[in-house]
Amino acid sequence: MDAPKKSSRRGPRRKNYMKQQDGVEIDTSIVNNKPVNKNVEDITEKNYERQLQNWDDFVDSLEDLKEYVFRIGMAMRGGKLPDERLSWKGLNSYWKKFTAAYNRERGTIPKDHLTSVTRLIEPRGALGKRLNIVADKGPRRHATAEVLTWAGEFFWTLDWKIFARPRLRNDLWAALLQSVFTAARVSDYLESSSRYNSNIGLHYKDTQFIVYQNERGEPEFALQLTKFLKGRCHLPSTLPTPDIHERGKLEPQALYTNPILFLAKEIIPIQWHGSVLNSPIFCGASGRIMTAGLFSKELRSLLIRAGFPNPPGLHSFRAEGLTNIDANPNCSDIQRQTMAGHVNNHIQARHYASRNPGIDSQAAFMRTQARLMNIGELFRNLEISWEPELWHSLPIAKKEQLSMSDEYREIEAQIRAFTTTKLELPMDSPTDPEFKHEAKHEVITMSPAEVDEAPLAHPVRKLRRDLESLEKKSLNMLWEETSKGMVVGDKRTFVCRGISRPFSRLRSVMPLRRQLADLLTIPARLRSTEGKAALVALVKLCNSKTEADRPGLGATCHCSRSSSDHLHIYKCTKKQFSFAEFCFFCNQWLYDAEAWERHCHDHLTQDLIPMELSWKRVETTFLPGHCPFCLWDTGLGCAKRLQSFCSLSDWETHIRAHGVSWQERCPNLRCEGSFHDGESYQNHLHDLHRVPKKLLLPAQTSLKRGVDDVSQEELPAKKAKLGDGPVEARFVFHYCDPGETFSGKGGLA
């Protein structure tokens, strides 16, 4: 049968795209018979390659597959205590990455092999029992509003950490508020490790800013964000767009809970300027978008400093937000799923919902009126343990006990061996710096490709990290021993333990932080006087280069020399006047002896002297040391009692000159209790008042300085240069047990 004749059509002839491409060069890397793998991120391919490299020495057999996961599991157990549990999710993640990579690059693994190994690593499997694997490490925890508000109060009023980049403090808290208030994952607004170097995250172009009239008829700001959900970034029409606002007609809360405040970097137009559209809302150190790794690391560190030994992650805040949305009768399941980026209710029920449903089952059974109070919220508050007296460094007694262990002493001996070994060059070798650098590089740094076991480029750093790891393990054990499992409370019960420079000492050298600490806790609206002042201070903080500064010691000295060394300015000013004293609490100079005596008297009677008295360097400035014996000696004049020691050596010399190794009571009357021996007395001064124990020991039993006795912040700003002399002096420090007596030998070699 003949094919039907096509009827003629009006209009232009249809183009034949195949004929138009005649002669085009075909890219065989794209057009071939190879199957197309699933499109994944670059970092995922790198993870696949890593697992394949672990497999390259094996062959495809069930025994080798079992040996492969056995070796991976034993490596994961390395460094853990025998009773410590290992999460099944971690080992299973490595196994899944390996199987995905093998199927992608090498071919299909037999199904019965996969089933056998999967059963082997289960918690009830033979390998699971051997490695002490558990299905999970407990139920999902919920970080409640009390945890967030305490974290904010601590972060802005008590936090002693100084950020090298001041804007990071603002961006870190802003990112936390936006994520918590919109129940976001850490990757929704930040660049996650699975999307490394992709620049995917929240930018100004992804937001919409409006001003509107709220319920009270007042103008209010609101900002709509875009969530970049994992696995759905290539489908922009499916991305949720939640909003944040200023709470409308509700009662004003502390300014640090206002999410709009921390996004107002300079001035907020309704339409973003074209020059900032591609700029990230939350910046990292290089000006690119903040990474999820940096955010998670800083969030964990912040919550530990705030007194949470087992801090919640951002997912715990997300779980609490979604649980509260689910319990709100005004919110539907569709609204919750859209906010969370879920496709069904099963995800909420399995991974986020609280095990306590929060319903009044007694009233339901008795058919009576249900109470309005949700008792389940009270129990969720117990899921995050808070320790208001958490130690942030090992007490001296624990540190001495650890330092006597064989493992610790062995690492210390290795450090001393490396630090006393110097690079020796031939006598006839050139002396120019370029040759010395090349020789040092040749001797110390060896390419790992040259030998199987190449030495580390910086072995001392690795050894010091090993010491820090031992101290961290001991500190974790101390946390478990002293844990009280309290519920989050107010800052009146919070005590800084093991910190030499808490914020109570840093207030005088952090003027912007001091101002924000006073403003951000005030319940006020953004347009109030306090809100505007807080906004101005935050802008200054974001634009500043450092958080630390001492206003009373400017950059210009009386000797007309521009100097950033505050100690030089302090000494030069005292030489310029017949009488001049600087108050390091108020940052002001006084030029009259009587006025200075009265000023010291006011400080002593107001009882605002910090408990920590050690000298500490803080970037370009310093915190002076004070003498605990003079400070609380009422028989001395106020100026003598409040004497400031502006160098570490002067302070240590003065403390040693007292020769006090034991007293029944602490000289600080605020300290209760008595001490029956010198050991407990010295430990108290070391741990609470930060007076090193080595300064309190008698001269004939003083400890020699060890490898970790001097921290970086205790070193002077500039090293003093030794002049030419007839004798070359070499300082050698020998290790000595705490019980060994000082013989007076071995100081100079």
Image (spheres, grey):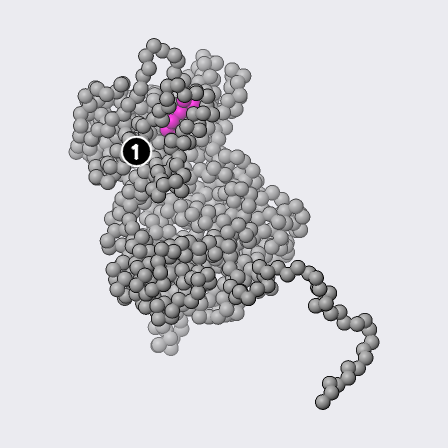
Residue at x 47%, y 37% (from the top left corner): 164
Horizontal side, residue 565 vs residue 248: left or right: left
Q: Which residue is mark 1?
A: 415
The range drawn in magenta is: 712-719
The part of the image, by quadrant, that contains residue 457 is top left
Q: Position of residue 546 (x, y in %)?
A: 50, 34
Residue that appears at 19% across and 21% down: 743
**Where's residue 199, x and y in %?**
55, 51
Residue 96 position, x and y percent, is 40, 62
Q: Is residue 516 magenta?
A: no
Which image quadrant: the C terminus?
Answer: top left
* Residue 546 in view of the camera: yes
Callout 1 amino acid: Ile
The residue most toward the right is 10
Q: Which residue is painted at 37% across and 36% down in the image?
A: 458
Which quadrant is home to the N terminus? Answer: bottom right
- In this orientation, does residue 222 appear? no
* Element type at mark 1: helix
Q: x, y (%) of residue 350?
A: 40, 67
Quick check: 711 above or below 13? above
Q: Is residue 308 above or below residue 660?
A: below
Horizontal side, residue 349 vs residue 213: left or right:
left
Residue 404 quadrant: top left
Which of 391/663 is in front? 391
| Tally of numbered tags | 1
Q: Nearer the viewer, residue 423 or 417?
A: 423
- State whether the magenta stretch is mostly helix, strand or loop: loop
Residue that lies at the very extreme toward the bottom in this rendered image: 1
